Amino acid sequence: MTKGLAALLVLLTPTSLCLQAQKRPVDYVNTFLGTAPLTNPADIGFTPPWRVWAGLVFPGASVPNAMVQLSPVTRFGSGAGYEYENRQIYAFAHTNKGHWNLCNIPLLPVSGDVNPDDFASNFSHKQESAHPGYYQVYLERYGINAELTSTLRTGYHRYTYTDNSRPKKLIVNLAVSNERIRDWKFEQDGDNAFKGYQIASEKVFFYALSNYKIAGIERLKGAKAELPVVDFADGVRPVEIKIGLSFVSTANAKENLERELGNKSFETVKANASAAWEALLSKIQVSGGTQRQKELFYSCLYRSFLWPALRSDVNGDYTDVKGGVVKGAFEYYTLPSLWDDYRNKLVLLGMISPDVTVDVIRSLIDRGEKTGFIPTFFHGDHASAFIAGSYLRGLRGYDIKSAYNLLLRNATLEGGTRPYISEYMDKGYISDPDIPDPVVETKGKAGVTKTLEYAYDDYSVALLAKELGDQTNYDMFMKRSKNYKNMFDPSTELMRGRLDNGDWVKNFNPEYPYYEYMYREANAWQSSFFAPHDTEGLIGLYKSKADFEQHLDSLFTISWNPNYIAENINSFIGQYCQGNQPDHGFAYLYYFVGKQAKSQAILNKIMSRFYGMGDDGLALSGMDDAGEMSSWYVFNAIGLYPYSPADPKYIVSVPLFQRTTFRLNEGKTLTILKKNSGERITNITYGGQEIEGYFVNHSDIEAGKELVITTN
């Protein structure tokens, strides 16, 4: 035995071997979480006539908040293009979100002759794998092992053919995406490259470079559209395709490709993508939980950082909201999924990726300055909560006065972000029509939801007004923030629709869900406790705290009627719906009546029951909505939650893990310790000082001390 080997064996003690075997955060991530269906009516709440929304996420390769999400498509027109139960792959597309859109620039490697109407390949999950920044699958029909990795603006394909005697080809199926295609273009560019664009809701340009010479381009006529097919020259090495994307031009797509990929190897790009994820995920380290809890935690943390997506090129160019090309001084991002993720995900984004968050806000301001209003997503005006909360948490680097003035316009002018704002300002509520026999799909104003949300948005603007010294508007918006009370019906002690004349909507069933009649994607139970800015005022509407608690008990115990079927409302605890966002803050309400342990019992039930569901343990209870559902799990697993995201503070709950270390933006580390394993919190200390109540301020946790949560 040599001296060097002997020394090495001495160093490799059992302890050191154990340390070496420890997983990194990135190794816990399962990118397939959220791709599988929910099929059990007991989990869903009813017998579904269609595939239940159970995640709607993609398993493919991406780096954090990137332009490119390179992922397999098993069914165009599905939420994210990939459904775990499917057994055929139609393409590898380069953009994704999980909202039935994108899936642009679909490519598929093939061999031999191509049938333009039938070219999908079977695959098996046994020959499929994925890791943050990497995806692999064996295409059985063609005998091709396909591997994908990516950078911010580029995708990298590697196709290993098992039979090199058959012609190697690439289908470029620009006639399809998850959206209706309005136009497309494809052309060869020299011996080894091709380029073009695809127009759906956006115009996406691409420039691709192959390690094989292009022998020719076939244009096959299918039943529905023309299908470009690239024929490669003969060879035995794997086919590699490097492709750059741009939302500005093919020239920019080429520049993105050259500057981000250049001569880098597939393995180098794959390793860099994994390292980027490890750097992000390792900002939160957890210990003491089960293996499964860690897998769910880091998978959810990963899923929280895929959207918003980058839209500016390496040279700074981006296409603005008016269609003009602008060279920006910041990175331009897509609109956040504000109705969903303002509740928690955008707070988490600010805590872990402040530079991205600042640029997302700058992108919102850019849109607002060119249209007159800061846009929203889907419903409400929740850029107000996002921007106010970010500013109050100390994020700077954007024009807060411009943002504030735009938010004032949002909150006071008709024709912008807030529909029916004139009625809201005049009456203090938004009315709905009285419809004798409404159904789930009945159209109305969603007046209850709008009134409740506008009231919270008013509060958010008020916080910003106060911080900026605008006392007049602070007073006005704080008064308006109480408008939620105008929807409270004392006879039912629930929030109820009102008619234009002030009367209550007569046909009222609090358990029946609507898409936009009185309530937005909810029923009365799932809407009636939303006042995170004034929970004490909400409780004051009831006869007593005991009466309020009884109504909360009813929320979580009245059984869901299995005959009430709405496509995106499923997975219940009583009337509470974890499968959609509107009531995601309601479990904490027991804190405000002195029953914190009842809240924790519900939080624990949600975390253990509604994440990793189904036969394969890969389903979520509802649509992940650009990371909102995932972020909900992340916050509750570490014992902090932004109960009111506009406020720079967090409600403390019992963590899943014994110890959590959270590396904060200023280089300091917050440590969260759980003592004992009960559901009732008996004591909270921060930096050795006891905290009164259950909230901890953002400014305090930034000091990087120990938060100790003692339970029994």
Image (cartoon, grey):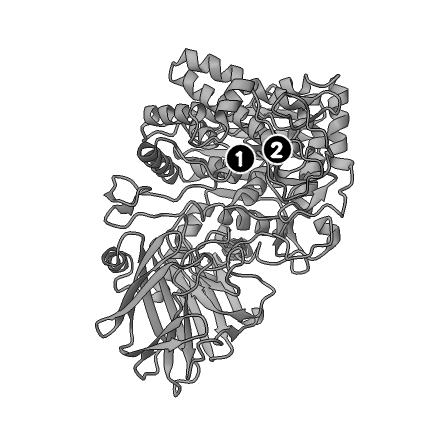
Q: Residue at x 61, y 48 (%)?
A: 622
Q: Secondary structure at mark 1?
A: loop
User: Label 2 sits on what residue type?
Assistant: Gly
Q: Secondary structure at mark 2?
A: loop
Q: Which residue is mark 1?
A: 343
* Residue nearest the viewer, comparing 438 with 293: 438
Q: Earlier in the sequence, mark 1 or mark 2?
A: 1
Q: Which residue is mark 2?
A: 585
Residue 554 against residue 115 in the figure, above or below:
above
Residue 221 against residue 202 in the figure, above or below:
below
Q: Are marks 1 and 2 in contact (CB under 8 Å)?
A: yes
Residue 270 drawn at (x, y percent) = 39, 61
Image-based side of 432 in relation to 426, left or right = right
Residue 609 drawn at (x, y percent) = 69, 47
Residue 339 against residue 1 in the figure, above or below:
above
Label 2 crowd (10 A; few <14 / some 14-19 / many >=20): some
* Residue nearest the viewer, comparing 299 with 495: 495
Whether residue 369 is visible, yes or no, is: yes
Image-based side of 511 in relation to 625, left or right = right
- Tell me where residue 227 sits by quadrant: bottom left
- Tell me where residue 497 sits by quadrant: top right
- Tell me where residue 585 sits by quadrant: top right
What's the CA distance linking mark 1 and mark 2?
A: 8 Å
Residue 629 drawn at (x, y percent) = 57, 44
